[in-house]
């Protein structure tokens, strides 16, 4: 994979910490008033750790996930990936860091409809500049792990909801990221399919040692994580 000086010069923290946020604040202007959604929030995610974040609707869970993924900027405080302060990076470097260190799984799969399952999974590797042959080999290997190798030539429209979400999970893991962020990854699935996907995620977390952060309304799913946090009044508290 392509190295990056921003990453290479920033390994001066505990090597086991893959993501941290310090004194994270997010304010929104609502008319003449300022609404504080995140209030000096702190988080330290270790390699291979799985945490779940629960909270009432409107508590700021998705806002927090967007901050952790570098998709939104905090009003104050900072987020680091592998020791790199992401707020100090330009968009080009941030994109490289995101492609190298992060995977995303959303409630809706966001697969590209014109590409096969194999091509969708290989896409992040192609973006990294890896050859199509090697990228497809690695994509097929991860599709085997999620049980979809026989369906690799199918396009998203030819797959079930659960199969599409498995492809999305495979795509998130194919670059071997340090962190995968998941926003309601089973929220759009029926209970049986959701339980299958949840079991798959638990198995993959143990096998690949990637750290997971899951935002979910499903308390049973949240309990599969090693640590469950409640987001309330802008702060995280262990349950």
Image: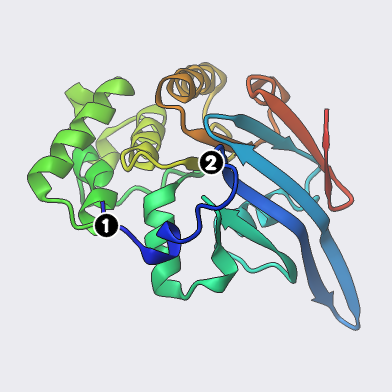
Rendered location of residue 120, percent (x, y): 26, 45
Q: Nearer the viewer, residue 48 or 231?
A: 48
Q: Nearer the viewer, residue 153 or 97?
A: 97
- Against 209, is 192 above or below? above
Q: Residue farthest to the front?
A: 12
Rendered location of residue 87, percent (x, y): 59, 69
Mark 1 highlights which residue? 2
Q: Residue at x 47, y 23 (%)?
A: 197
Of the two numbered discs 1 and 2 on the same chain, state the one appearing first in sequence. Answer: 1
Residue 202 is left or right of residue 139, and the answer is: right
Q: Is residue 154 visible?
A: no
Q: Are marks 1 and 2 in contact (CB under 8 Å)?
A: no
The quarter holding residue 161 reads: top left
The quarter holding residue 150 reads: top left
**On the rendered image, what quadrant is the C terminus found in?**
top right
Q: Residue at x 75, y 69 (%)?
A: 76
Mark 1: few, some, or many residues within 10 Å (few <14, many ≥20)?
few
SS state under label 2: loop
Mark 2: few, some, or many residues within 10 Å (few <14, many ≥20)?
few
Q: Nearer the viewer, mark 1 or mark 2?
A: 2
SS state under label 1: loop
Rendered location of residue 209, percent (x, y): 46, 27
Label 1, label 2: how far apart the Cα atoms are? 20 Å
Q: Residue at x 66, y 36 (%)?
A: 216
Q: Nearer the viewer, residue 196 or 15?
A: 15
Q: Residue farthest to the bottom?
A: 32
Rendered location of residue 96, percent (x, y): 37, 62
Q: Nearer the viewer, residue 13 or 237?
A: 13
Mark 2 highlights which residue? 15
């Amino acid at each position: 994979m392509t190295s990056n000086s921003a990453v290479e010069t920033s390994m001066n923290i505990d090597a086991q910490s893959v993501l941290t946020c310090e004194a994270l604040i997010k304010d929104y202007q609502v008319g003449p008033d300022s609404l504080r959604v995140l209030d000096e929030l702190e988080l330290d995610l270790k390699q291979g750790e799985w945490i779940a974040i629960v909270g009432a609707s409107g508590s700021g869970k998705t806002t927090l996930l967007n901050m952790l993924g570098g998709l939104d900027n905090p009003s104050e405080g900072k987020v680091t990936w592998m020791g790199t302060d992401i707020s100090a990076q330009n968009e080009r470097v941030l994109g490289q860091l995101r492609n190298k260190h992060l995977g995303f799984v959303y409630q809706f799969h966001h697969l590209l409809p014109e590409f096969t399952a194999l091509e969708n999974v290989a896409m992040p590797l192609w973006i990294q500049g890896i050859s199509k042959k090697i990228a497809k080999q690695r994509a097929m290997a991860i599709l085997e792990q999620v049980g979809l190798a026989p369906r690799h030539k199918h396009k998203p429209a030819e797959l079930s909801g659960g199969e599409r979400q498995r492809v999305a999970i495979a795509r998130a893991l194919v670059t071997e990221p340090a962190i995968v962020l998941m926003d309601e990854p089973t929220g759009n699935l029926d209970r049986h399919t959701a339980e299958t996907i949840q079991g798959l995620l638990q198995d993959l977390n143990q096998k690949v040692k990637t750290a997971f952060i899951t935002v979910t309304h499903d308390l049973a799913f949240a309990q599969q994580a090693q640590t469950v946090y409640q987001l309330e009044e802008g702060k995280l508290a262990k349950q």
